[in-house]
Amino acid sequence: MDYRLVSFPVVAKGLLPLSLPKPDAINACGYLLPKTGGGSYYEYSPLDLLVAGLEAGLMGFFCLDLAHFFESRSVILSESKIYLTVIEYDSKKYYHDSILGFKALIQFSGNSELLKVLKRNAPWTFRKVL
Amino acid sequence: MSQELINPQDLINQGVGDNSVVDANLPSGIQFLPNLNVAYALSKAVSEKGIAKPGEFVLGGQSSLGKEIEVIALDYRRRAGYQKKDWSYEAEIFHFSNQGDVRENAEYQSFIEKCPQDLKMVNGADLLLFLPERMVFCTMFMKGTLYKFANPIMNSGVGGRVLNLSTSKVEGTRKAAGKTWYDIVTVKTNRAAMGSKLEGVEASVEMPADKLGEAVKLWRNPSAASVTDEKVEEVAR
């Protein structure tokens, strides 16, 4: 099965209560982007930033480190407020649900292909689903 | 030490293949590549930060990878250091022993023998690993009870094969009664890095070539890395 992420909310990083260090191999959780002119560089995934930033705004704190934020929390409320759309490319079937909904779907169905696509786009958020 | 360009495919299929002492007297606080450790109950990641459980693999003291991970083993060398009481290192030395015996190297041996009395000698194997899930190159310093698992990992991982590592808790008996530690179980998978010449495997795991080049350069010459103000976070006991 070939899945693709077709839509997720636009993230205005400057408006979120985040103050993060330069992304590196650990705190970007392996989100690697190609560099113009060859090579690659680590960057924060926009979805991870949105999850952490929205949670920080809801709970009233300032997020200083994504690694510590995601590792020290088992329940994240903002996951129920962010909606994604994924298309199953062969059958043209659409899935539109919150991050929490996608996590539940993967847990129950054991769909590792879907998890792979979501993990590539939001490595911190989906790191420990299966 | 050779400084020519690194060919990723040669590295996967042959290893770094150097046989030289790299560096002694590195400043404390140097972190040339992230460390991968097994967390114990007294580790900072467990007791202070609360980000991992005992027996889990911890990357750089910041992120837990769980009790089971997939790795590609790229290279092996001997590593020794003078450790202070706060777990930081006073001085370190690295020796590539792919093609030679560590006992034949006078510089390495004299470093071990000259350990000051107020410091602890730490000696073991250092592995260069790639974690496909995180797209990260890291080192794993296997000292103490973990030292004996370095060889099985390197032997099973020949040719860029993806290995499944997991920890299992061991409770000591007789002389070691009351003590617990973790063993590493190594299982071969039928997948390998792209460019591997192994037969009967699916060579599908992609390694970022530029990051591989950077990692190997730092691996060969750790003092080229920038020194951080904070001390290296050690997850060991």
Image (cartoon, helix red, strand yellow):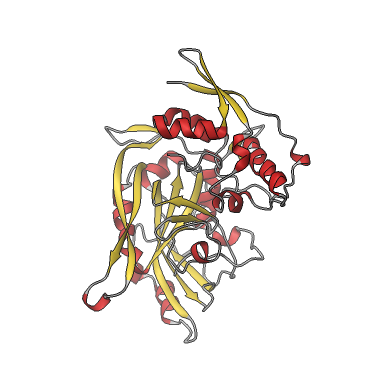
Q: Quadrant of residue B182?
A: bottom left
State the count of labels: 0
Residue B176 falls left or right of residue A1:
left
Q: Residue furthest top?
A: A91
Q: Name the spot of residue B13 as percent of width and height, x first.
A: 36, 42
Using the rendered image of the protein, determine whether residue B5 is visible from the camera's viewpoint. no
Q: Position of residue B81 (x, y in %)?
A: 47, 72
- The residue lying at 52 percent from left, 78 percent from top is B84
Asked if residue B129 is positioned above or below residue B231 in the image, the reply reads above
Q: Which quadrant of the view contains residue B48?
A: bottom right
Q: Which quadrant of the rendered structure holds the C terminus of chain B?
A: bottom left
- Indicate left or right for B102 with B63 as reference: left
At 45% from the left and 59% from the top, the residue drawn is B37
Viewer-closest of B151 and A30: A30
Residue A9 locus on image (x, y percent): 67, 29
Q: How far from the left and from the top, in percent, is residue B116?
A: 48, 84
Relative to A75, does residue A99 appear above or below in the rendering? above
- Eyeballing the image, is B52 above or below B214? below
Q: Residue furthest bottom?
A: B117
Residue found at the very far left of the displayed protein: B174
Q: Nearer the viewer, residue B101 or B197?
A: B197
Seen from the viewer's position, the closer of residues B187 and A57 is: A57
Does residue B85 appear in the picture of this structure? yes
